[in-house]
Image (spheres, rainbow, N blue to C red):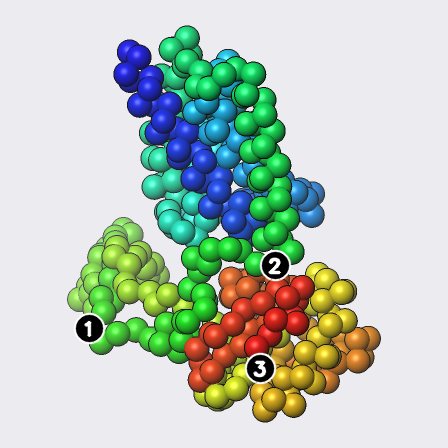
Amino acid sequence: MKLLVGISRWVTGILFIFSGFIKLNDPIGFSFKLEEYFSPSVLNLEFLAPFALVIALLVVVFELVLGVMLLIGYLPKFTTWALLLMVIFFGFLTFYSAYYNKVTDCGCFGDAIPLTPWQSFYKDMFLLVLILILFFNRKYITPYFAKASHRWIVFLSFMLCFVFAYYVLMYLPVFDFRAYKEGTNIEQAMTVPAGAPEAVYDYHWKFRVNGEEKIYTTRGAYPSVQGEFIEVETEMVQKGYEPPIHDFSIEKDGEDQISTILAEDKLLMIVAYSLRRSENDGLRKLQDVIEKARSNGYRVVGLSASGEDLKEKINEKYNLDLDWYFSDETALKTIIRSNPGLVKLEEGTILQKLHWNDSDKLEL
């Protein structure tokens, strides 16, 4: 039993530390995922949405430190109870998401290891088994290091977590696992290669035949049925190839201008997914950046999901000479975790991404 407890302890502790660190590297991304869970279509807890970032930080820091506490053997009773309650809660959440198909990616390991809802649920059930072993055999969780050092190790873990969180919030995630990382050519990442597998659908055709409703299933062809057609429903049975970037567009007056804009050999995109939620200090810095970029031969465009009226008000309020385009909010949140943020490109290839706090580091 000691060996089983030892294995469970190390596997659980390392998984909690890894999962917590991945999310701590990108707490804004995890807060977006929490907002998705809080939405009316999922848990209907909209009153928590304004606090999503604070909740995200508390959850990931607690998750990471719990892993450290388990490994060093600090307060085993509290630690095993906390682990058990945490995995039960997230197990319920992932099961709810998977069974009702509410959230397509739980965000358990951020963008580093995307998991489907069912994969997330199975992972939580695996952890639940390990944690139950620890919970009922906590007497075998022997401490490492001197007990007097445990509080200092836990305190240091908390402090390092908050310092790291402050850094990635004030700048950008240290590790970028998203499709828009530096070095990516956007148009290439949007291309479906020749011969890539296509999605396969079953078509369920409903007919009324001799007064009875009957369903005939095909892979697309209209069935040869002597009866009155009622309706058809489609069901995806095999997912086709999806390029890394599949939801990005740059629109003006209803027309997609992405090819023209990304063809620029000197392009600076100012990304603000929501101008209503943009940071004022960041908006105040933009005009100096715009002027500097244009003096170096760059085309400067703004991307936002906000309405045209708000874009005009922002330009007027902050004295911005900026031509705004419309892009999907989710895509803009994925491109850069700064609102506003700066993205420098050359013929569609991302060369530099900067938080507005780092605008003076823009290389032109």
Whether residues under marks 2 and 1 lie with C-beta atoms below 8 angstroms apart, the answer is no
- Is residue 30 among what the camera can see? no
Whether residues under marks 3 and 1 lie with C-beta atoms below 8 angstroms apart, the answer is no
Where in the figure is residue 28, as x and y percent of width and height? 58, 52
Tell me the amino acid under the disc marked 2.
Tyr
Position of 336 compared to 281: left or right? left
Residue 39 in the image: above or below residue 256 = above
Where in the figure is residue 67, as x and y percent of width and height? 47, 29
Q: Nearer the viewer, mark 2 or mark 3?
A: 3
Tell me the amino acid under the disc marked 1.
Gly
Q: Quadrant of residue 153?
A: top right
Single out the residue that lies furthest toward the right: 317
Residue under label 1: 195
Residue under label 3: 364
- Could you classify mark 2 by the number of other residues whose Cα lies within 10 Å: few (under 14), some (14-19), or many (20 or more)? some
Q: Nearer the viewer, mark 2 or mark 1?
A: 2
Viewer-nearest residue: 338 or 192: 338
- Is residue 169 among what the camera can see? yes
For label 3, the SS is loop
